[in-house]
């Protein structure tokens, strides 16, 4: 029989479940708590502990909260091997504003990537509120976990994909932890895209610590789109099956667009001129180099920039809509995330 599983003050007995809120600090009024919600399903039998991390960005939350709710209801602690620890809203501050980061705390933190929980791992117990959240997640959950899945969303228009940081402080390709991460991502079943190492994101920090991890980007974020929720639930169950936490057969993704083989990111395209931008291609559509993917107009309707595809490849998402929810850009803003 497994031992009880603890995350801060929350304890799930062997063959049982638990949930709760862990307080990290307070807002500037001195009485409103900054908290992290956690639920645990702890099996009776030994097996891996899997961390499901969601809500690092506040405009990417609703689908994952609903998916994790459905998953929790389906997990039987008497039958699973190991345990599942989930944080459905890691950055509640950003969720309140439906923004990538919490604007009031991003302004006062005074650190690189201020307020961006996605880029401050493994955190700092004496740092900003965002660094302290990351530190709690790292020390209380990641350290006792054997694998992690980081759930995000690119918004619409966009395509769902599994995003693989190829390491943390250095390349992990060819190592056992990379192979395990690939196996998890392939089991999830979406288009698989790799990018460079990043030691500050959850997946990159996990790879540095010898723990397999990858990131999921679904295509609908702050809405309860049934196709998105179903695909995310199927993929997460597939990962738990792959790791041996639950029994079952890995199911192929249906009703979502999936490209075969593995792909690699290209440099993100930025706007050279500001204005009102129209996107002229679909995400996931193969594009030849030189294809006009968007046009930007000024307030009088004059085209001020044609944005072209720099190489053969695909657009995975248009950040103006994914990040800030509108089709206006300033010079230097992100326009398109692309891959080959």
Image (cartoon, rainbow, N blue to C red):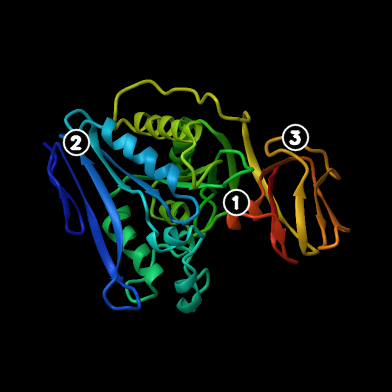
Q: Nearer the viewer, residue 270 or 177?
A: 270
Q: Mark 3 and 1 residues: CB-CB less than 8 Å, in contact? A: no
Identify the residue shown where x is 60% and y is 30%. 257
Residue 21: image x %, image y %?
24, 57
Disc 3 marks which residue?
286
Please state, as top left, top right, bottom left or bottom right, where the C terminus lies in the image: top right
Q: Residue furthest top?
A: 249
Number of dots carrying numbers:
3
Secondary structure of the residue carrying tag 1 is: helix
Task: Classify 10 Å Cα crowding around label 1: few (below 14), some (14-19), many (20 and above).
Answer: many
Secondary structure of the residue carrying tag 3 is: loop
- Give the spatial CA distance, label 2 vs label 1: 37 Å
- Give the spatial CA distance, label 2 vs label 3: 45 Å
Q: Nearer the viewer, residue 115 or 279?
A: 279
Q: Earlier in the sequence, mark 3 or mark 1?
A: 3
User: Which mark, by number, is residue 322?
Assistant: 1
- Left or right: residue 244 compared with residue 108: left
Identify the residue shown where x is 51% and y is 49%. 172
- Left or right: residue 108 compared with residue 275: left
User: Up-down: is 193 above or below 337?
Assistant: above
Identify the residue shown where x is 29% and y is 32%. 245
Residue 272, quarter of the rendered image: bottom right
Please state, as top left, top right, bottom left or bottom right, where the N terminus lies in the image: top left
Residue 259: image x %, image y %?
63, 30
Q: Earlier in the sequence, mark 2 or mark 3?
A: 2
């Amino acid at each position: 029989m497994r031992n009880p599983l603890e995350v801060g003050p929350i304890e799930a007995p062997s063959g049982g479940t638990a949930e709760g809120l862990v307080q990290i600090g307070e807002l500037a009024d001195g009485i409103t708590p900054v908290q992290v919600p956690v639920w645990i399903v702890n099996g009776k039998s030994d097996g891996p502990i899997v961390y499901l991390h969601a809500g690092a960005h506040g405009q990417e939350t609703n689908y994952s909260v609903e998916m994790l709710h459905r998953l929790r209801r389906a997990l039987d602690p008497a039958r699973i091997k190991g345990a599942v620890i989930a944080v459905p809203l890691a950055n509640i501050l950003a969720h309140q504003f439906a923004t990538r980061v919490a604007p009031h705390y991003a302004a006062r933190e005074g650190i690189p990537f201020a307020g961006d929980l996605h880029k401050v791992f493994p955190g700092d117990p004496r740092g900003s509120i965002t660094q302290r959240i990351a530190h709690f997640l790292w020390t209380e959950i990641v350290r006792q976990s054997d694998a992690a899945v980081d759930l995000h969303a690119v918004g619409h228009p966009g395509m769902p994909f599994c995003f693989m940081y190829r390491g943390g402080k250095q390349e992990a390709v060819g190592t056992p932890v990379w192979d395990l991460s690939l196996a998890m991502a392939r089991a999830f079943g979406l288009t698989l895209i790799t990018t460079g190492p990043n030691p500050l994101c959850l997946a990159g920090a996990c790879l540095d610590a010898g723990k397999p991890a990858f990131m999921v980007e679904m295509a609908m974020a702050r809405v309860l789109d049934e196709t998105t929720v179903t695909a995310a639930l199927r993929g997460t169950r597939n990962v738990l099956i792959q790791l041996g936490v639950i029994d079952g057969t890995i199911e192929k993704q249906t009703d979502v667009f999936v490209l075969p083989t593995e792909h690699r990111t290209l440099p993100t395209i930025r706007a050279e001129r500001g204005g009102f931008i129209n996107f002229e291609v679909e995400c996931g559509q193969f594009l030849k180099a030189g294809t006009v993917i968007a046009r930007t107009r000024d307030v009088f309707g004059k085209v001020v920039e044609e944005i072209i595809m720099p190489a053969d490849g695909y657009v995975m998402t248009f950040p103006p809509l994914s990040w800030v929810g509108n089709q206006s850009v300033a010079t230097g803003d992100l326009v398109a995330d692309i891959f080959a």
